[in-house]
Each structure stands twice: as C-alpha cells, then as structure tokens.
Image (spheres, helix red, strand yellow):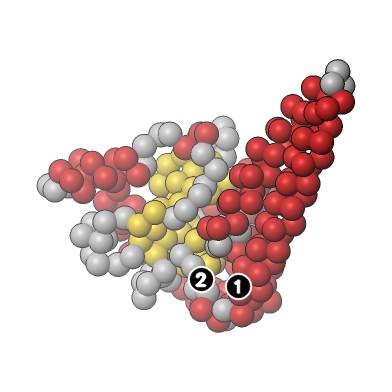
C-alpha cells in the first residue's frame, strides 16, 4: 500500500458506495433510542408472554410490548435509511486514510488502530511516527498526555465492539487530528489479514464522518 493507492481509493466512488452502509451505521445518534427501546420491549414481550400463559389478563400487555417492538424496529430502519442516503450524498467528502495497528487481542482478532483524516492521511511515515510515540509513551514529559494515551490503548478492548473514534491529544500528534478506533480483523478476508502482515500492520480505512471503516485489500489494490 502506497500513497498513490490511497489516492486512487479516495477517488473511487464505487468502492465508497460498497462501504457506505457500514459508514452510516451509528451516524445518527438518535437511532440508538428506538434500538434500546426495542430491546426492552422484546424482554417485556417475553415476560408478559410467560405470565399470560397462566393469566390471560396479561395478554393485552403482551400485545402492547410487541407493538412497541415493531414500531421501534421500523423507526430504526427508517432512521438508518436516512443516514445511508445522506452518506451516499457526501461520498466525495469521504477520505481514504492509512491506518496502523497499535495493539490488541490476537486471539479475538480485535485491535486498536490509528489514522488521521487530515492533510497527512496518506503519509505512511507520519502514522508510523505516531505509532512509535505511542509505543514509547513513557518518554512523554507531559503527565496528562501520557496518562490519556495509556488509557486510550489500555488492554480492555476484549469486551468492546469498536464504537466511536476517539481523537488523540493534538499536542501529541503535532497538531494533526489522529483518531483511535477498534477494528475486528476476524471479520475480514484472509487476503486482507495477509496484507496487514505484509504492510507491517498498516491498512486502509475510509473515514465516514471520522469513523474509519476498514477496507478489504482487494479494494485497496484493485
């Protein structure tokens, strides 16, 4: 992977469309509300279904819970479709970035990665330099920054699922916006995992509203 391949990827609208759905997921934070309500209503439906076996009076509560569940699922789908449509309208603004694995759980294939969406997003030497600073964070003289970096890359990601990209302190990254995010390599193709080793832990992401989405190697080199 080179800066030239990243530039080509950044201009490839068809590839961006392929990852737009993943990029849109979580874009509308309000979509979490119907999703949470759907989970609670599903538990409620199960609870009232069990009780209604012995007392038919609870059947009405069961139907209400089912109705809430269905309504929440529909609301979530509608909101996600709107987010997806918005994402498709802004594909030209989605940058391709070089990312670097920092640390993680090899058994779970879950890793912390870093990338920048700024002007140095194709700069391999820059991202390698930030990775080096993270690996040698004990040399950092600012205790506040040192503590923050330690916490951001602490070995606690086994139970996490990725989530929101977190910015590193800009004092630590020479003023460049560098993000940390978790990536699941167990869900990608073998060729992508092989390329990760070949590229010394580097891989490509498409950043949808700063959320880095891992790109399969076939789309990077293709």
Q: Label 2 belongs to which residue?
A: 96
- Residue lying furthest top in this view? 54
Sequence-first tag of 2 and 1? 1
Residue 42: % across, % down = 73, 37
Q: Quadrant of residue 192?
A: bottom right
- Number of callouts in the render? 2
Q: Is residue 156 left or right of residue 56?
A: left
Give whichever of 197, 158 is nearer the camera.
Answer: 158
Q: Is residue 96 left or right of residue 61?
A: left
Marks 2,1: beta carbons within 8 A: no
Q: CA distance from mark 2 to mark 1?
A: 15 Å
Residue 87's label in the rendered image is 1
Query: SS class of the residue under badge 2?
Result: strand
Q: Is 153 placed above or below 212 here?
A: above
Q: Name the residue located 54 percent from the left edge and 52 percent from the top edge.
A: 196
Query: SS class of the residue under badge 1?
Result: helix
């Amino acid at each position: 992977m080179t800066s030239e391949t990243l530039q080509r990827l950044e201009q490839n609208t068809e590839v961006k469309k392929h990852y737009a759905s993943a990029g849109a997921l979580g874009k509308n934070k309000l979509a979490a509300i119907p999703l949470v309500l759907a989970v609670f209503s599903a538990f409620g439906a199960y609870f009232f279904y069990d009780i209604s076996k012995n007392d038919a009076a609870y059947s009405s509560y069961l139907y209400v819970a089912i109705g809430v569940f269905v309504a929440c699922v529909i609301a979530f789908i509608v909101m996600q479709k709107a987010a997806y449509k918005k994402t498709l309208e802004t594909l030209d603004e989605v940058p391709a970035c070089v990312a670097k694995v920092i640390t993680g759980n090899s058994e779970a294939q879950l890793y912390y990665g870093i990338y920048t969406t700024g002007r140095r997003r194709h700069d391999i030497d820059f991202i390698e330099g930030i990775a080096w600073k993270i690996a040698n964070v004990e040399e950092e003289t600012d205790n506040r920054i040192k503590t923050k970096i330690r916490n951001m890359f602490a070995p606690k990601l086994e139970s996490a699922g990725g989530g929101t990209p977190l910015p590193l302190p800009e004092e630590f990254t020479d003023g460049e916006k560098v993000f940390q995010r978790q990536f699941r390599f167990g869900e990608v193709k073998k060729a992508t995992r092989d390329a990760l080793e070949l590229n010394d832990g580097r891989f490509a992401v498409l950043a949808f509203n700063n959320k880095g989405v891992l790109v399969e190697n076939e789309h990077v080199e293709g």
